[in-house]
Image: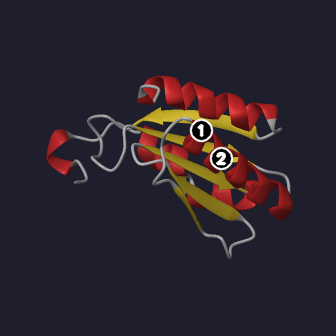
C-alpha cells in the first residue's frame, strides 16, 4: 500500500485522467483527526460524478484500501469517497460553490479550536 501522500497523488491523477475539473488537495494534518488529506473535485453531470466516484473507489481498492466506500450514492450532485485517511469530495459546480469546503478547510484553525 502506498503512503497517504503518494496515494493522494494517485487519486488526483485518477480524477484528472477521468476529466474531473478544479481538483484541489487540502492537508488536514493538525486541523482534524478525521483524515490526513482531503481532495475536492468537480464533475460535469450526475453521471460524470458517479463515474468519478466509482473510478476513485476502484483505485483505492487497487492500492490496498479495502474498507473504502462511497457516501451519497442517492445524490445526483455530490459524492464522498471515504478512503480512511483520505477523503474525496466530488461535486457539481453549483453545490461545490454553495458548500465552500475549500474555504472552510483551507483556513488556519487555532489549536484550541481543532475539530476532534
The colour scheme applied to this rendered structure is secondary structure
Image point 27% across, 47% down: which residue?
33
Image point 75% across, 32% down: which residue?
16
Q: Quadrant of residue 77?
A: bottom right
Q: Is residue 77 above or below residue 4?
A: below
Left or right of residue 47, residue 104 in this image: left
How many residues crowd around disc 1 within 10 Å: few (fewer than 14), some, or many (20 or more)? few
Left or right of residue 36, residue 55 in this image: right
Helix, strand or loop at mark 2 = helix
Circle 2 sits on which residue?
Answer: 58
Label annotation for residue 51? none
Circle 1 sits on which residue?
Answer: 62
Label 1 with label 2: CB-CB less than 8 Å: yes
Left or right of residue 108, residue 70 in this image: right
Name the residue nearer the viewer: 34 or 61: 61
Image quadrant occupied by the C terminus: bottom left
Q: Quadrant of residue 4?
A: top left
Q: Provide residue 87's location: percent of width, then percent of height.
A: 49, 47
How many residues crowd around disc 2 within 10 Å: few (fewer than 14), some, or many (20 or more)? some
Image point 69% across, 28% down: which residue?
13
Image quadrant occupied by the N terminus: top left
Left or right of residue 67, residue 78 in this image: right
Q: Provide residue 98's location: percent of width, then percent of height.
A: 63, 61
Helix, strand or loop at mark 1 = helix
Name the residue nearer the viewer: 46 or 115: 46
Amino acid at each position: 500500500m502506498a503512503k497517504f501522500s503518494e496515494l493522494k497523488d494517485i487519486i488526483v491523477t485518477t480524477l484528472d485522467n477521468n476529466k474531473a475539473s478544479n481538483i484541489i488537495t487540502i492537508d488536514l494534518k493538525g486541523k482534524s483527526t478525521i483524515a490526513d488529506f482531503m481532495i475536492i473535485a468537480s464533475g460535469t453531470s450526475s453521471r460524470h460524478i458517479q463515474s468519478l466516484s466509482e473510478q476513485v473507489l476502484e483505485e483505492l481498492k487497487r492500492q490496498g484500501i479495502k474498507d473504502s466506500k462511497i457516501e451519497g450514492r442517492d445524490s445526483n450532485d455530490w459524492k464522498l469517497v471515504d478512503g480512511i485517511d483520505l477523503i474525496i469530495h466530488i461535486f457539481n459546480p453549483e453545490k461545490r460553490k454553495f458548500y465552500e469546503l475549500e474555504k472552510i478547510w483551507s483556513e488556519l484553525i487555532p489549536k484550541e479550536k481543532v475539530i476532534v
